[in-house]
């Protein structure tokens, strides 16, 4: 490199031959001292100590900001998610424990042979933000239960991992559509695996009175503006009849929100608390309430 | 900036490293426990509801 630049410099002043030779000699004698003396001096010429330290601070600040932004993403995707999932675990446990204290289930819960307990009671309306149920979807794993609150406010309800009930939809036990929303990923949600649900899978809703069992029916992928999915008869203005549905809306694709993934379940049966939890979730319920 | 901080930290090399790591941990913990939750309230959350 250095030899090349010395050569080109020589070619530039090519008319005076004698001068060229002296010039090409000069860099070679300089070469031995250059690494320790010349380069540092050149640097100091371009960036004075002051400006280089200012540039250094700016550069280091930018790197620091970049690192903090990355750290924020790690926090949002993993750490906050784990913290909120943990919070939900203790919220559902406390709730199950509170209900069990008021009306304890039999010890051998789930063993009652009876399956038909007549029409379900309608869940008493609670105020906006109030908690009234726990939703269990065994297919999504043993820790997938989350508490259900009234309202779909992102800050106070959804961003804490709750299912949020659409305020204008029906209550469980009421003919029509009980519609809730939940985050797909992050914020302690356990709904990322929603597409693993298979037709016939059960969705259990525990309330103060007992257990409502729904059967997963189908999915629907819709635009975010498709508000008709939360109508009493989804997608239709048809009269309600006596059909009872659960509708769960979440975002799609994973980590995006260009669409909504809608999960429908049909009411199957009801079981009072005194008859114990449905066998499929009895283990989880008993673990929580003890 | 960080060179200046490094100069300020007293002690032999191992102690400087230990202090730096401890200080960085405190900063990261403070960010995760207080700053990020606060920043998160200003972020537009991903929408999961259907609406007009």
Image: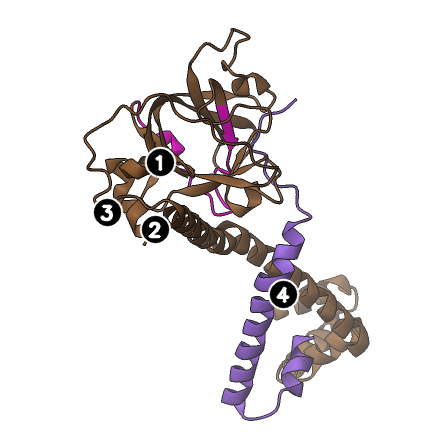
Q: CA distance from mark 1 to mark 3?
A: 23 Å
Reply yes or no: does residue A186 show up in magenta. Answer: yes
Start-end of magenta stretch: A178-199
Q: Which residue is mark 3?
A: A107
Q: Which residue is mark 2?
A: A289
Q: How many marks?
A: 4
Is the residue at mark 1 from the same chain as the one at mark 3? yes
Give yes or no for contact between labels 4 and 3 (Cβ–Cβ under 8 Å).
no
Percent across and percent down for residue A164 are 54, 36
Viewer can see residue B22: yes
Q: Which residue sits at x=58%, y=55%?
A: A72
Image colour assigned to chain A: brown
Q: CA distance from mark 2 to mark 3?
A: 11 Å
Which quarter of the rendering shows the N terminus of chain A? bottom right
Q: Residues within 10 Å of mark 3 (few under 14, many from 20)?
A: few
Q: CA distance from mark 4 to mark 3?
A: 91 Å
Q: Which residue is mark 1?
A: A137
In the displayed structure, A98 sits above or below A242; it is: below
The chain ID associated with circle 2 is: A
- Asked which secondary structure carries label 3, the reply is loop
Looking at the rendered structure, which numbered label has been put on residue A4? 4
Percent across and percent down for residue A7 are 66, 66
Q: Which residue sits at x=50%, y=27%?
A: A171
Is the residue at mark 4 from the same chain as the one at mark 3? yes
Q: Which residue sits at x=60%, y=24%?
A: A168
Q: Residues within 10 Å of mark 2 (few under 14, many from 20)?
A: some
- Asked which secondary structure carries label 4, the reply is helix
Q: Residues within 10 Å of mark 4 (few under 14, many from 20)?
A: few
Left or right, residue A111 beside residue A136: left
Q: CA distance from mark 2 to mark 1?
A: 18 Å
- Asked which secondary structure carries label 2, the reply is loop
């Amino acid at each position: 490199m250095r030899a090349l630049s010395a050569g080109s410099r020589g070619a530039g002043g090519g008319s005076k031959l004698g001068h060229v030779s002296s010039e090409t000699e000069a860099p070679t004698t300089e070469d031995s001292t250059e690494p320790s003396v010349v380069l540092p001096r050149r640097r100091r010429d371009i960036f004075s100590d002051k400006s280089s330290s200012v540039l250094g601070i700016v550069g280091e600040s930018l790197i620091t900001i970049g690192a903090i932004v990355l750290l924020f993403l790690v926090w949002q995707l993993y750490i906050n998610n784990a913290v909120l999932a943990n919070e939900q675990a203790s919220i559902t446990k406390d709730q199950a424990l509170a209900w069990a204290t008021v009306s304890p289930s039999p010890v051998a819960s789930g063993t009652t042979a009876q399956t038909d307990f007549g029409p379900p009671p309608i869940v008493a309306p609670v105020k906006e933000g109030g908690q009234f149920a726990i939703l269990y979807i065994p297919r999504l794993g043993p820790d997938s239960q989350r508490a259900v609150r009234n309202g779909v406010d992102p800050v106070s309800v959804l961003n804490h991992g709750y299912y949020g009930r659409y305020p204008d939809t029906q209550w469980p036990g009421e003919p029509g559509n009980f519609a809730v929303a939940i985050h797909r990923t992050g914020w302690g949600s356990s709904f990322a695996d929603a597409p693993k649900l298979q037709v016939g899978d059960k969705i259990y809703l525990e309330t103060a009175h007992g257990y409502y069992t729904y059967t997963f029916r189908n999915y629907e992928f819709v635009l975010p503006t498709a508000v008709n999915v939360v109508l009493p008869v989804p997608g239709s203005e048809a009269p309600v009849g006596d059909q009872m549905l659960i509708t769960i809306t979440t975002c799609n694709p994973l980590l995006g929100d260009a669409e909504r993934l809608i999960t429908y379940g049909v009411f199957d049966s009801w079981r009072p608390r005194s008859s114990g939890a449905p066998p499929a979730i009895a283990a989880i319920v008993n673990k929580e309430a003890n | 900036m960080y060179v200046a901080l490094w100069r300020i930290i007293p002690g032999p090399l191992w102690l400087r490293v230990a202090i730096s790591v401890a200080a960085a941990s405190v900063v990261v913990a403070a960010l995760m426990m207080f700053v990020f939750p606060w920043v998160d309230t200003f972020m537009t959350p991903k929408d999961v509801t259907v609406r007009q």
